[in-house]
Amino acid sequence: MPACDNNLYELMGAKNHPSCRDNLNSTLKDFDVDVDGNPDPVNLFQNTPIVDLDGRWEVRESVAKPGDYVQFKALEELLVVVAACSMDLSDLNGGTPTDLMLEVFE
Ligand SMILES: [Zn+2]
């Protein structure tokens, strides 16, 4: 699923709304990364299931609960950029985006 961006929010009638695309890109610029070529994100707690064989999907409230987590093991040095989606205009975040906690272990 692509990151939310200004176009999506403008279609929903919300100009200048914070977006994952802007948040990710602004951070990537700090690391001298070409933001035009950055891939779409991996959505860990998003609930947008495919609901039909024609590829139709729906936006649903996340089924993640406070304290749920995902753990990754980096096998080489890498740059990870994370955004807690600010979508508050659909069911995506239950209408209320929440904070995201990260822990990095060495
Ligand atoms: Zn987002």
Image (cartoon, rainbow, N blue to C red):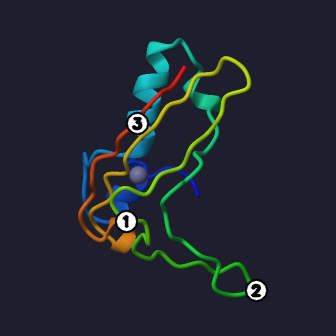
**Closer to us: 58 or 42:** 42
Q: Is residue 40 above or below residue 34?
A: below
Residue on which disc 1 sits: 65
SS assignment at label 1: loop
Left or right, residue 27 beside residue 34:
left
Distance from label 1 to label 3 (Cα)? 16 Å
Check whether the beta carbons of the residues at disc 2 and disc 3 lie within 8 A of each other. no
Left or right, residue 23 beside residue 25:
left
Look at label 3 and name its amino acid: Leu
- Label located before the other in sequence (1 or 3): 1
x then y, percent, for residue 87: 33, 58
Look at label 1 and name its amino acid: Lys
Mark 1 Cα within 10 Å, few/some/many (few <14, many 20+)? few
Residue reaching furthest to the bottom: 52
Q: How many marks?
A: 3
User: Is the C-beta of the residue carrying label 1 under 8 Å from the nearest atom of ligand 1?
Assistant: no
Distance from label 2 to label 1 (Cα)? 29 Å
Residue on which disc 2 sits: 53
Residue on which disc 3 sits: 102
Mark 3 Cα within 10 Å, few/some/many (few <14, many 20+)? few
Please identify the quadrant where the N terminus is shown. Answer: bottom right
Q: Residue at x 42, y 32 (%)?
A: 103
